[in-house]
Image (tube, rainbow, N blue to C red):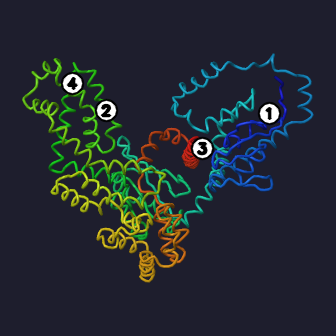
Amino acid sequence: MRLFEPESMPSESDKWGWKHVSVFGGFDKGSGTKRWKCNYCSLRYNGSYSRVRAHLLGSTGVGVKSCPAIDRSLRDALQILEEERLARKKKRISGSGKSSKRIRNSQPSLSSVWKASPREDIDDSVARFFYANGLNFNILNSPYFHDMAKAIAAFGPGYEPPPVEKLSSSFLHKEKTRIDKAMGPIRESWLYTGCTILCLNRLDCALGSFSSNVFVSSPRGFIFLQTLEINEGNKADNVLAGVLNNVIMEVGPRNVVQIIMHPRHSSKSSESLIQSKFPQIFWSPCTSYSIHMLMEDIAELDWVKPIVLCAKGIEQYVLTQHSSLSVFSQNLKESFGPTSVKLSPSYRLVQRIVELKQALQELALSEEWRQWKLTFPEDFLSIEAAILGNEFWSGAHMVLQLFEPFVRLLGLLNIDECIIGDVYNWRVQALEAVRSKGIDEIILKQLEVLIENRWETLFSPLHATGYILNPRYFGKGQCKDKSIMRGWKATLERYECDGTDRRVLREQISSYWRLEGSLGEEDALDCRDKMDAVAWWENFGSETPQLQTLAIKILSQISSISTFQVSWYENSFCREAANSLEADIAADLLFVRNNLRLQGRKIGNSNSSSVRT
C-alpha cells in the first residue's frame, strides 16, 4: 500500500451521492460511468457521479432532471454535504504537492510500517470503547456513527481526533452554525403552515425539580430550542410561563397555532398566564393521553368495571401468590411488564388475560393448582370459576370490541403525522363501530353520554375545526352538530379577535359548504378524498383566502406528543455532561446534540422509505 493514494480513491469514497441511489451496473472499468436509479423518485440514468449530484441537488445542464421527490429541507441538507465534500477536497489538494511526491519516492510502501488489522480486532476495539465508557449500544444505529467510521477509514492510518478544548469551542460553534443554516427553511415555513410548540417536561423527584425540553413542530420538521431546569415551588409556574413567552416571541406569536404539554406536567397557572398575553394561541391536550383517559373512564362503567376487576384478580393470584408456579408466573410477568401497561392499563390487562386464556385454563386444571388453592380463602374460588367458565371470557371479548376503535386511533397517532383533522371523525366512527357490535341500547347511551361529557375537557376545539375543514369529510352534517359548531365558534373567537375578520371567515365557510366558485369545480370534488387536505386547500381555496390560510395552518399541526416523549426519554442526555460545562457551552451542546438527533431521525426515515421503494 502506498503512503499517498491517487486522488481518485479518497475522492470516490467521499462522494455522498452514491448513498442516495442504487447502482445496478457499470460500463468500462474505471470510467466512473454507471447505471443507477434514484432512491427517492426511482428515475433511472446512465452517468458518472456528476449526474448523481446534479439530480439530487437540482442542478441543470448535465442531462438529468432535478429529483421531484426531494423537498427543500432535504435538499438543503444534501447541499451542506456537498459543501463539506468540496472543502475536504480543497484541503487534500492544498496539502499535496512536491513534498508529498518526495515522500512517495522515498517511502513507496507502508507494508513495513502498517498492516490492515483483522476485522475481528477492529470489532473488539469498537466494543471495548462502548464498554469502557458505558455507552448505549443503540449508538451503533446512528447515521453519524457510521459517517464517522467511514471518514476515519477513508483518511487512513495516522488520524488523530481533535483535542477536547476544540470539541467544546470551535468545532461546537461550527456545528451550531451549520445547524442554524439548515434550519432556515424550516423557520421560514412557519409563517405559511403555522407551528406547534411542544413542552416535554420531566420530573426529578429526588432533586425537587423538573426539566422542560422545548421543541417546535411543523410539516417541514422538528426543531429543538432549549432545555430549562426549573425548581419546583410557588414560582415554578411563573418561570415556565416566562420560558414559553420567550419561545413564542422567538417563533413569532402569529406563527404559533397551539402549545401541547402532557397534562400531568402542565398547570392551569402557566396556561392562564400565556393565554392572557397570547389569546389566539390554543393550549391543546395531547390526544394520546386524552384517548387513554377516555378508555379508563369507560373501564369505570358499571358493566365494564367487574370484568376489569376480575382480570386484575386473576393477575394478582397468579403473579404474586405462589412461587411454585415460577415458570408460568414469569411468562405472565413479561406480559404485564412496565412497557405493556404504560398505555391504557385496563385495556392492556384484559387483552393479555384473553391472550393467555388457554394457558390459564390448563393451569386451573393442573394438580399444582389443586394443591395450591387449598391454602387460599374462599374468594379464590371465584377466580377459578371465572377462568373455567364462559361469562368472564364473553364479557372480556365484548370489552375488547368496545375499545377497538380507541386502540386503532392510538395506532394512527404518529408524531410525524398531521392528523388533527381526523380526530373528530374517529369519534363518529367509534360510536358507529360500537353500534355495529349489537351492544345493549342502555350501555350504548351510557357511552355516548360519557364521550359527550368528556370531549370538550379532553380534546381541543381545533379537532372540530379540522373535521370541518378536511375536504375528505365534506357533507357529514357538521353544521348541524352542536359539539362541532361549539368547537368552530371557540376556534374563531381565539384565532381572530376582530369581529369583522370573524365575519369574513363565517361567510367563507358558507361558500365552502355551498361549493361556490373553485371549491365546487369538478377537480375539487374529485380530489377531496384523493389529495392531502393541505394540498387540496392550496389548489382550490384561493377564492376564500382567509379560510384557506386558517385551513392550512390547522391541518398542518400534530395532535399528540406521547410517542415522541417516550422515544426522546429513552435516549435522554446525560445531565452530568452538561453540568460539567459552562452555561453557554452547555446550552450550545444541548442545542446541537438534540437537533442532530432530530436530523438523524429524519435521515433514518428517508433511508427506510428508500428501502421500501
Residue corresponding to mark 4: 362
What's the distance in space between the residues labelled 3 and 1, CA to CA? Answer: 27 Å
Q: Amino acid at mark 3?
A: Ser
Q: Amino acid at mark 2?
A: Ser
Q: Residues within 10 Å of mark 4 (few under 14, many from 20)?
A: few
Q: Residues within 10 Å of mark 1 (few under 14, many from 20)?
A: few
CB of mark 2 within 8 Å of CB of mark 3?
Answer: no
Q: Nearer the viewer, residue 110 or 314?
A: 314
Residue corresponding to mark 2: 335
Residue 599: % across, % down = 58, 47
As helix, strand or loop, the secondary structure at mark 4 comes to: helix
CB of mark 3 within 8 Å of CB of mark 4?
Answer: no
Q: Quadrant of the N terminus?
A: top right
CB of mark 3 within 8 Å of CB of mark 1?
Answer: no
CB of mark 1 within 8 Å of CB of mark 2?
Answer: no
Q: Nearer the viewer, residue 59 or 396?
A: 396
Residue corresponding to mark 3: 610
Among the two numbered marks 3 and 4 on one chain, the one whose residue lies closer to the N terminus: 4
Q: Quadrant of the C terminus?
A: top right
Residue corresponding to mark 1: 9
Q: Residue 171, which numbered label?
A: none
Give the left or right position of residue 147, taking residue 456 as reference.
Answer: right
What's the distance in space between the residues labelled 2 and 4, CA to CA? Answer: 18 Å
Q: In the orientation shown, which residue stands out farthest toward the top?
A: 112
Among the two numbered marks 2 and 4 on one chain, the one whose residue lies closer to the N terminus: 2
Residue in the picture at 44% in, 42% down: 569
> Is 144 rendered above or below residue 3?
below
Q: Amino acid at mark 1?
A: Met
What's the distance in space between the residues labelled 4 and 1, CA to CA? Answer: 66 Å
